[in-house]
Amino acid sequence: MLRIGNGGMSISEYTSYFSLWSISKSPLIIGGDVTNMSQEIFNIYLNTEVIAINQDPLGIQGKKIKVFPSEITNRVLFTRCSSNDPMKQTQQWIFNSNDKTIRSIFNNQCLTIDKTNSNQFITRQCLNNDENQQWTLQEQILLSEMFPFPMKYVNQTIQNNEKNLCLSVEASSEIWSGPLTNGSQAVLFLNRDHANSTTITVNWTDFGWPSNQTGHVRDLWLRKDLGVFSANYTSQSIQPHAIQMIKITPIH
């Protein structure tokens, strides 16, 4: 049930919420008081082009196809271990026995204990002899003088000993995609960053089209044709927690 308009989010965040719900083919059930909604909220619910993505007869759920790290600092947290791309790459780590650092394959930064934030994990630029980036590996067990709890290091993943969760770098932006009945693709660009705007590029090969395919691109929230593109499309500048949602129709 959609909680759009119930408070706690900005209009752009509600738009992101509705768009993700739609491309995922989740039921579009209003969960708020329609007698007390602003016109801005009604405009989200009444976007027929986004609703059409949700109701497309092909019925194939859109999925996350690509994730991108922040160039500065990334939050790290335990999530369910994934065996599938693109999330698997966010859970892969390399232990360096020479300098005793653990480097993320996803963003090439070092696992760091953030002493300013209750010993939470982050990744940031690797530094020489930073005690917050120093780890010891003993028989698949990772230890740190700065962090009291041991973790398992197995097949380039760092796992919670008790809950079978994997340490994951939180992506800064994402691309979602799903096929439609006429051979088109719905594509959603999501900026998860809390402070910075970004642009995101989707390549046709990311969702299975040949690189020489041309396609007509339409913005579903602006309700505007953006033109014909070949091989890829780069989004507009997307604000924090906001999205751009497009439909790409192949030209034969």
Image: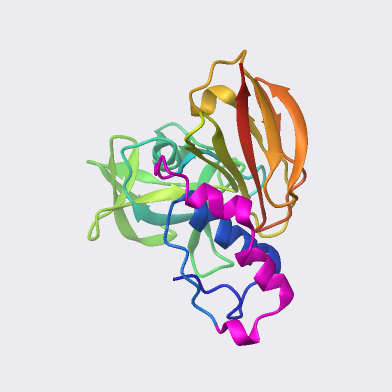
Q: Is residue 108 visible?
A: no
- Residue 41, magenta (yes or no): yes
Q: Is residue 122 above or below residue 4?
A: above
Side of 82 relative to 56 (left or right): left
- Residue 100, magenta (yes or no): no
Side of 83 relative to 91 (left or right): left
Q: Is residue 123 above or below residue 6?
A: above
Find residue 45 and report its horizontal and vertical position in percent. 60, 66
Find residue 143 and report its horizontal and vertical position in percent. 34, 51
Find residue 98 and report its horizontal and vertical position in percent. 44, 31
Side of 226 relative to 169 (left or right): right
Point out the image quarter for the C terminus. Answer: top right
Residue drawn 61% across and 77% down?
Answer: 5
Q: Is residue 44 visible?
A: yes
Find residue 33 and report its horizontal and vertical position in percent. 56, 84
Question: What kind of colouring is applied to the model shown?
Answer: rainbow
Quick one: 212 or 131, which is closer to the camera?
Answer: 212
Side of 220 relative to 117 (left or right): right
The tally of labels here is 0
Q: Is residue 86 above or below residue 167?
A: above
Per the rendered image, the range of residues in magenta is: 33-61
Residue drawn 61% across and 80% down?
Answer: 7
Residue drawn 47% across and 64% down?
Answer: 28
Quick one: 120 or 61, which is closer to the camera?
Answer: 61
Point out the image quarter for the N terminus. Answer: bottom left
Quick one: 71 or 12, which is closer to the camera?
Answer: 12
